[in-house]
Amino acid sequence: MAGPGAQLVSSFPVAKEPQKPRPKKVPELPILERRNWLIHLHYVRKDYDACKMIIKEQLQESHGMCEYAVYVQALIFRLEGKIQESLELFQTCSILNPQSADNLKQVARSLFLLGKHKAAIEVYNEAAKLNEKDWEISHNLGVCYMYLKHFNKARDQLNKALQLNRHDLTYIMLGKIYLLEGETDKAIEVYKTAVEFSPENTELLTTLGLLYLQLGAYQKAFEHLGNALTYDPSNYKAILAAGSMMQTHGDFDVALTKYRVVACAVPESPPLWNNIGMCFFGKKKYVAAISCLKRANYLAPFDWKILYNLGLVHLTMQQYASAFHFLSAAINFQPKMGELYMLLAVALTNLEDTENAKRSYEQAVALDQCNPLVNLNYAVLLYNQGDKKGALCQYQEMEKKVNVLKETSTLDFDPEMVDMAQKMGAALQVGESLVWTKPIKDSKSKQRAASGKPSSTQQPLGSNQALGQAMSSAAGYGKTIQLSSGVGISAPLAKPPSLPLEPEPGSETGPEETTEPQERRKEK
Amino acid sequence: MGPRWQQDGAFGKEKKKEPGPRAPSLAVPAGAAVYVYQNLRPFYKHRLPPRAPAPLERDVWDQARQDKIDPLMLKEMLESIREKAEIPLSARSLRFLTLEPGELQAFVTLHKDQPLQHQTVITCMTTLRKDLADEDGATCLVLGTESREVLILDPEAFTGLAQMTLAAVPAFLEATGQFDVEYRLTAACRNGCLYLLRRDSRRPRCCIELSAQPVGLVRVQKTLVVGCSDDTLRGYTQKGKRLWTVQLPAPLLTMALLEQKSRGFQAVLAALSNQEVHVYRDKALLDVIQTPDVVTGLIFGRYGREDSTLLMTTKGGGLLVKMLKRRAVLEAPLAPGPPLAQAVRLAVPKKTRLYVDQTLREREAGAAMHQVFQTELSRLRLSAARAYVRALQGSLAPLSATPQHPLSLRATVQGVGPTFKLTLHLQSAAPAGASTGLLLSFQYDEHLYAMASSLLRTPMLVPGLNYPIETFVECLSDKGISDIIKVLVLQEGLRTPLLTAHINMPVSEGLVAA
């Protein structure tokens, strides 16, 4: 860089030396810090090889007393993953200069990276004595406390850090703590302030969008996810979440175009292929849907949502035997979901195994809290079996659920379900016309006003996938396999297969589809 | 002394035109001094005044000079000073502390008569107009030092005009305004902070925490543009509020200001490690210059008669000169558009004809398939259960299941034949006391193998210890066949064995080869 300059300068001392005759020649001691700036420059330019060479020379020259050279060497070790070595060097630094809070901070940071959170906290506290108003110390103390699960202390420290100096990272950590404590509302508040402070941070925008999505505030969620995408059009999380929302609204082509970006960036993402598969399902391209879902399943074999969707698509394709396997696999991973048992029951009904279908429905009804479809489908089966009493009982259960739903949510019921319910009501009406007429009116009005469980159950499927929380939420449940294994053992009777159906149009909702086979049968 | 100077000079990184009255000069900082050149000839050398050492340290050395304390005591005292003092020790004291006991006396005699000095080092430099804003005005040098200070030097006399203290060592300096009127200094420091200073402020007025190391600092009108080691370029206001952030495609190496005075146009040049130089105006990427090597130094300005020239030095030692076309318009930002990946088709896995056929078959005969599957599954489970029961009843497993004698057996076969050494490792896990009265019995084809004894008595088995029992087996066949030897562990007085192990004997290679 300064080739010619170097030569020129070298001529300087030669010119000057004669002017300074000294009685006794004492060798001038080199200044310890003379190459610090160069070490620093190479370090920030990430030219670590050159940096290490200079550090080595400098340490030889200064007999290891050059604090900054040791410091940068430790930083480089840390970047190379040699945390223990870096810790030792930082400790050397703090021996060379015990008054420096920075050295202590780095010692603590290395301890933190080694997972020794308690030791890190002690060193940070010591550093805080030397430098009270340091954002970094408070922030890192907060993070340490978070890992030790002392959430109160962690929050205090993080809030202190925010008072000293506002950083996106502190907001993110604070939000995380609220989420760990299950206080989504407070987390949203934190992220909102953070987004106001730093409106272009895509991570903040995406997280906030996903939180809104979880709460069902779709408008706000879409707004934030959209903002994230304007700043970073290839943000993986935001695309998946926004795509799943588009899917709910039936914009399958737009969603697919967006997914292309993700497919290039993260081609092995299970949620991505799950969502793509469900897009094709929505577009009635069932073969493509199955192959995408199977890829998703290959990438994440333990994700019950993918298995659920696979079961659903196979039901639509009238591949009941395959559907049975996917659904029973899903139940093994997620044994607490009524809808899964209902789908399994539908598959079993079509496989002529009414006995086990009934057992599966029983389980579904026992587990499910609010989906009227479960009861309706069960009622249809019971009715077809000639058990009018049981059918009526299930029908009334369904009415209850419908009434609750009407009050609580605003989305429409699936017209097909309403139609089916009316027919069922008509068929059961023997002497119960009074009871029956009401629900018909209800359900008619419901078509516009009340909410359908189907659409609300299906959204989490897409969106939660994007959140990557499906696994964690599913993991909480213990395993009870009794039903599926019971089904497996039973030997079904041989009967001619039922009439194959043409795949019906429909959104990617699971439960909706399942009414169709039932309905057809009844019409027979 | 010569070589050291040369070395230091090689590090001189800043070359600044410092126009005095009509004759531009070049200032090169190196070590503790600034060298000024005029017309490519050495002109003046200014050495920074040394700082006074810590008073305690000076006292100690004074005492040493008067031979009041011996070197060992001196060392002890210096150690204690180092641990407490606010001001770091001088190079002499630090060097002294590293010496072996034998060298101490000589060092003290050599150095004690020299005045104790604490010399600092220049880390960065920039320029600031003295009084006039135009090209010809005199320029002050602004220096950042290792002792966390910023000095402003008089253009003529090189005396210090102003001095400010920072919280960390400055790495990059930026100055605007005129010294005599009003000026602003920005220092990017090694602790990852930007400090903003103004005239008459001895301490920084405002601090921006970057949470990454600054790699370059440029002022574009009223915006401070900082390049950081997390591959971002950020814009800040003069009050420290962040305006925007741009993600760079590669690590940043250096930055410079691009200024076309005729148009009043300013932009930021950023040299990246992917051999590109990017031109940014605020967030917008205006242009990308490809270079043959990684650029490590950038300067834009007048070169000869050409006003807009970009000089680039490369890592390999090259120098590139690029001149901006006089009619060039750098206004239109490159359109962002959707990401390229959006045009790539999804690679949906294809399904074969066979798959479709199977699907159709399943539709027709789904129930039957299900039944067959379930029947076969039940059969499989049944036969697995039977095999398990058989294994349990015959104690066929190498682990004994009886609660009185929880035993495990491991066998190894050594040798190539015809004689093999068979080692049986017996281990007992009985919670209550040692197992006694156990027998080892071997069952084998007598036409194939011969053993000294087919019944062995085991020693008393202390729980937890491993008992290797060795025996020899001779293979009688030369046809290259092998067989299984069964090992039964028996308890005296019991009819069924405690456990059974099957040893697959290797082929006797000795006889086959012969």
Image: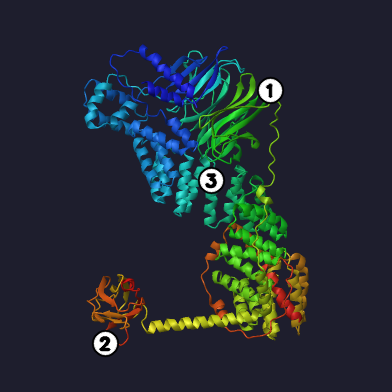
Look at mark 3 in the image and give the residue it sits on: A169
Residue B307 position, x and y percent, is 64, 22
- For the residues labelled 3 and 2, the Cα–Cα distance comes to 74 Å
- Identify which amino acid the numbered label 2 is placed on: Gly
Q: Quadrant of the C terminus of chain A?
A: bottom right
Q: Which mark is residue B429?
A: none
- For the residues labelled 2 and 1, the Cα–Cα distance comes to 112 Å
Q: Give the side of residue B34 with respect to residue B484, left or right.
A: right
> Mark 2 and 1 residues: CB-CB less than 8 Å, in contact?
no
Q: Residues within 10 Å of mark 2 (few under 14, many from 20)?
A: few
Whether B487 is drawn above or below A246: the answer is below
In which chain is the residue bearing label 1? B
Secondary structure of the residue carrying tag 1 is loop
Q: Is residue A124 visible?
A: yes
Secondary structure of the residue carrying tag 2 is loop
Q: Which mark is residue B493?
A: 2
Residue A405 position, x and y percent, is 69, 68
> Which residue appears at 58% of the width and 65% of the height?
A297
Q: Do dots 2 and 1 share one subunit? A: yes
Of the two numbered discs 3 and 2 in the rendering, the one whose residue sits closer to the viewer? 2
- Identify which amino acid the numbered label 3 is placed on: Leu
Residue in the foreground of this view, choosing between B127 and B341: B341
Look at mark 1 in the image and give the residue it sits on: B262
